Image: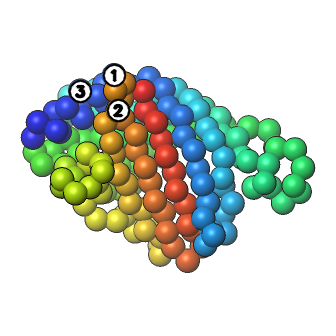
Amino acid sequence: MARIVQLKTRLSSISSLTFRSRSGTGSNCGWSGEGQGYVIVGCHPDGSVTFTEAGHFQLDSRSTDSGTASPPPLPFQNVFRWRPEHDRIALSHERRGIDAAVWLFDLVVADHEQSCDFVSRKAHLCGKDRYQACLTFMDQGFDLEWRIQGPRKDEHLHYRYR
């Protein structure tokens, strides 16, 4: 329970994010690049916390078909809801609104052999793609690493929330 309280406290202090996306050899997506943006934190009466994120994502030049200069940055926006429970934090994606929220997974306290503070209890399945995550406390916030694997996806996303 103490780790859940610690994470909830950190959630309310976040104001920015940076992330790196790397496509593996099994990816048909080619979304390697880097992004940065801001986070607006919302604290709600039910104890949940929302992150409204917006910023820009820059594809690596080698991710494009032309092999020439990098394309212009792409805008992004997301809304994530972090809902603390007694033994976990439920994470949902609300980009299309609260009524169309997609539950992703529950983050549970990692065991001592893992390098993370929290891990996804089970993988989230979206079609045949499996989404898993690992959250690690850092001095000024936390890192959230996503692994997405499926028939067409082999992606690693490393978010730094500060």
Label 3 crowd bin: few (<14), some (14–19), many (20+), radius 10 Å: few
Query: Does 106 sit above or below residue 45?
Result: below
In what element is the residue under mark 3? helix
Q: Amino acid at mark 3?
A: Thr
Whether residue 65 sits left or right of residue 104 in the image: it is: right
Q: Position of residue 109 (x, y in %)?
A: 19, 49
The residue at the point 35 percent across, 32 percent down is 138
Whether residue 108 sits left or right of residue 136 in the image: it is: left
- Sequence-wise, the earlier of marks 2 and 3 is 3
Q: Position of residue 141 (x, y in %)?
A: 36, 29
Query: Would you name the residue on which mark 3 appears?
Result: 9
Query: Would you name the residue on which mark 2 appears?
Result: 138
Query: Does 104 sit above or below residue 37?
Result: below
- Sequence-wise, the earlier of marks 2 and 1 is 1
In what element is the residue under mark 1? loop
Q: Amino acid at mark 2?
A: Met
Give the CA distance from mark 2 to mark 1: 13 Å
Residue 11 in sight in this render: yes
Give the CA distance from mark 2 to mark 3: 13 Å
Residue 99 in sight in this render: no
Query: Do the residues bearing badges 2 and 3 touch, measured as CB atoms within 8 Å?
Result: no
Query: Would you name the residue on which mark 1 appears?
Result: 13
Query: Do the residues bearing badges 3 and 1 touch, measured as CB atoms within 8 Å?
Result: yes
Query: Which of label 2 and label 1 is nearer to you?
Result: 2
How many numbered discs, if any?
3
Q: Position of residue 78 (x, y in %)?
A: 50, 40
